[in-house]
């Protein structure tokens, strides 16, 4: 009988691990994030390249499992959501659930202004050196973005991010031989401005999303969570264990979410993709696999 119970426990744990690793998994199981293709607005910027840059920066940040653009496109088609840029809230929540992805990032290039002008001060002569004019290029870029938490249905931010680049080149001459000091490259300046805006956007995403994962298993000695050295988890870090529930309004059909903190756990041992934690506060019996864990300190 004891062997059977042990086998049953191992079987249940294996099923939980399979659910965690499968595409279905637990809702909100990790800090997964999907980027809807950005709209390029009235600018000449390629929307696919804009979206690729944003995704790449988020992957580099290392805080998220970023959903592939192919999966995002397939989910949008399945849900019959044919959109670029900003989705409405209900469509974004539906996309989050379809992808089993916690965060949805959307955005667009609001404006891209490239100003070029020449100034001619009338010429200045200093010995054999002549300075005649200045060619100036200024780039101003604004990008708007919105981040939605699919678990809570909350819009975490809607904000504009700016990029700026300014360069000058001078016309000079030595013994009346004209030398152009190199015209500013407006294309590279646009890339510089866009990189600035994207960097600000990624910082905002990271600061708006707490490090979180989920409970894999509740063992006799430890509570196992789905984050390890791959998420820079270290012994001593504390996480709140959160139970999330959803209720459907019987009249309006609106989905209303609620959360309840079930305890505080402290990381004791860390492996590559999971950590073993001890309960610091709360009742272990109230903590179940699939509950969310959110970093506290």
Image (cartoon, rainbow, N blue to C red):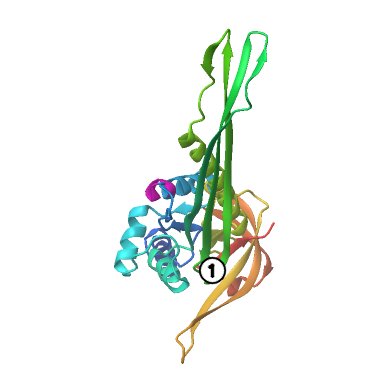
Residue 148 spot, x, y in % from top left: 52, 65
Residue 47 spot, x, y in % from top left: 39, 50
Instruction: Give the image quarter of residue 164.
Output: top right
Q: Is any part of residue 194 visible from this angle?
A: yes
| Bounds of the magenta segment | 46-50
Q: Nearer the viewer, residue 113 or 94?
A: 113
Task: Report crowding for label 1: few under 14, some 14 to 19, many 20 or more residues within 10 A (C-alpha).
Answer: many
Which residue: 65% across, 50% down? 235
Residue, disc 1: 291
Q: Please tell me whether residue 208 is drawn above or below residue 186 in the rendered image.
A: below
Q: Examine the structure image and report whether residue 211 is included in the region drawn in magenta.
A: no
Q: Quadrant of the N terminus?
A: bottom left
Residue 194 spot, x, y in % from top left: 51, 44
Instruction: Give the image quarter of residue 93.
Output: bottom left
Q: Please tell me whether residue 49 is drawn above or below residue 177 in the rendered image.
A: below
Q: Nearer the viewer, residue 247 or 48?
A: 48
Horizontal side, residue 12 vs residue 80: left or right: right
Q: Is any part of residue 271 visible from this angle?
A: no
Horizontal side, residue 63 vs residue 100: left or right: right
Q: How many marks?
A: 1
């Amino acid at each position: 009988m004891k062997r059977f119970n042990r086998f049953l426990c191992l079987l249940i744990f294996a099923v939980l691990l399979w659910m965690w690793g499968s595409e279905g998994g637990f809702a909100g199981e990790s800090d997964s994030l999907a980027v809807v293709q950005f709209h390029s607005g009235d600018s000449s910027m390629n929307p696919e390249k804009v979206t690729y840059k944003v995704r790449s920066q988020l992957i580099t940040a290392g805080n998220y499992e970023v959903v592939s653009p192919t999966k995002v496109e397939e989910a949008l088609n399945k849900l019959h959501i044919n959109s670029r840029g900003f989705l409405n809230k209900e469509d974004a929540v539906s996309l989050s659930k379809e992808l089993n992805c916690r965060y949805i990032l959307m955005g667009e290039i609001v404006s891209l202004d490239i100003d070029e002008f020449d100034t001619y001060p009338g010429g200045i002569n200093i010995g054999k050196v002549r300075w005649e004019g200045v060619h100036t290029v200024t780039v101003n870029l604004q990008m708007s973005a919105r981040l939605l938490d699919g678990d809570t249905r909350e819009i975490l931010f809607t904000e504009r991010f700016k990029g700026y680049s300014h360069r000058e080149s001078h016309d000079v001459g030595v013994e009346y031989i004209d030398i152009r000091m190199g015209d500013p490259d407006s294309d590279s300046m646009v890339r510089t401005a866009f990189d600035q805006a994207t960097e600000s956007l990624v910082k905002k995403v990271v600061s708006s999303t707490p490090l979180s994962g989920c409970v894999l298993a509740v063992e006799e000695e430890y509570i196992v969570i789905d984050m390890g050295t791959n998420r820079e988890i270290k012994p001593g870090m504390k996480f709140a264990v959160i139970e999330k529930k959803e209720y459907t309004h019987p009249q309006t059909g609106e989905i209303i979410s609620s959360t309840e903190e079930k305890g505080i756990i402290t990381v004791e041992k860390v492996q590559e993709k999971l950590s073993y934690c001890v309960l610091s506060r709360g009742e272990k019996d109230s903590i179940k696999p699939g509950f969310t864990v959110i970093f506290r300190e």
